[in-house]
């Protein structure tokens, strides 16, 4: 019967192979967030476009990707699409699946943020001769961005942990590399706790960053509100 090994835990806590998995988790999170946010903004704008067909298409997209498990989506992208001639590497499939899934959730966050900006401000911008894209870039989006920072930050925190699902298609992020080491060393609890430690470190650091972002943009919002009074 295996007994807990402190030596094994500390030996693998800073294991280069495991740390590289944490690095992969970080860049996979950042890349998925980047592409997911771009697509999420586009989907949100389609939902708000007023065009019934475009809004319906965007709503259908959200329905599909929010209503099915990410695990299933990754398996379809990696093992199902090749049946139709679309082949992706493990990295491409993981990034594509995570970005598409994240975009569906981010689109709702962005849509609610944009909807919270009063229509009178957009109308005022148009009355001043600004084009719609200029109104969105200079008036609507800066205000909406302040509103979406808290839920967006929570999405990043969740995405850091959700990347572990990519291990099912052999993406060598933190969890997958932990599983590989377990198969070699049989230190199950020690290695899982080492992985949990690094997930906790990453989410804690992001929490600190998120607090600073909220403080910075919230301060700007408070000053603007004070000026209006």
Image (cartoon, rainbow, N blue to C red):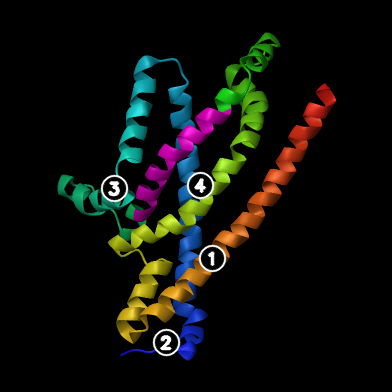
Q: Which residue is mark 1?
A: 200
Which one is earlier in the sequence, the residue at label 2 or at label 4?
2
Report the disc number at residue 155. 4
| Residue 102 within the segment the image draws in magenta | yes
Question: What stretch of residues is rendered in magenta?
Answer: 94-113
Quarter holding the C terminus is top right
How far is disc 4 from disc 3 in space, using C-alphas?
Answer: 18 Å
How far is disc 4 from disc 1 in space, using C-alphas?
Answer: 15 Å
| Residue 62 within the segment the image draws in magenta | no
Which of discs 3 and 2 lies nearer the camera? The answer is 2
Which one is earlier in the sequence, the residue at label 3 or at label 2?
2
How far is disc 3 from disc 2 in space, using C-alphas?
Answer: 37 Å
The outermost residue toward the top is: 127
Q: Quadrant of residue 181?
A: bottom left
Which one is earlier in the sequence, the residue at label 4 or at label 1?
4
Q: Which residue is mark 2?
A: 4
Residue 187 in the image: state x and y as whole percent.
37, 84
* Residue 229 placement, left or right of 114: right
The residue located at (41%, 57%) in the rendering is 163
Which one is earlier in the sequence, the residue at label 1 or at label 3?
3
Which one is earlier in the sequence, the residue at label 4 or at label 3?
3
Report the disc number at residue 73. 3
């Amino acid at each position: 019967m295996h007994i807990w090994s402190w030596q094994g835990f500390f030996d693998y806590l800073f294991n280069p192979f495991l740390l590289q998995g944490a690095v992969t988790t970080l860049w996979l999170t950042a890349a998925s967030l980047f592409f997911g946010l771009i697509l999420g903004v586009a989907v949100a704008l389609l939902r708000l476009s007023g065009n019934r067909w475009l809004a319906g298409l965007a709503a259908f997209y959200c329905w599909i990707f929010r209503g099915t498990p990410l695990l299933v989506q990754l398996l379809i992208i990696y093992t199902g699409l090749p049946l139709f001639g679309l082949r992706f590497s493990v990295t491409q499939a993981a990034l594509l699946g995570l970005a598409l899934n994240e975009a569906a959730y981010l689109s709702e966050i962005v849509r609610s943020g944009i909807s919270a900006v009063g229509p009178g401000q957009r109308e005022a911008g148009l009355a001043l001769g600004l084009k719609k894209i200029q109104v969105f870039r200079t008036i609507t989006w800066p205000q909406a961005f302040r509103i979406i920072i808290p839920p967006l930050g929570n999405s990043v925190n969740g995405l850091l942990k959700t990347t572990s699902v990519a291990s099912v298609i052999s993406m060598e992020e933190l969890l997958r590399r932990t599983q590989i080491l377990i198969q070699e060393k049989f230190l199950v609890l020690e290695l899982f706790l080492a992985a949990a430690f690094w997930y906790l470190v990453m989410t804690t650091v992001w929490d600190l960053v998120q607090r600073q972002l909220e403080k910075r943009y919230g301060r700007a919002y408070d000053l603007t509100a004070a000026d209006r009074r």
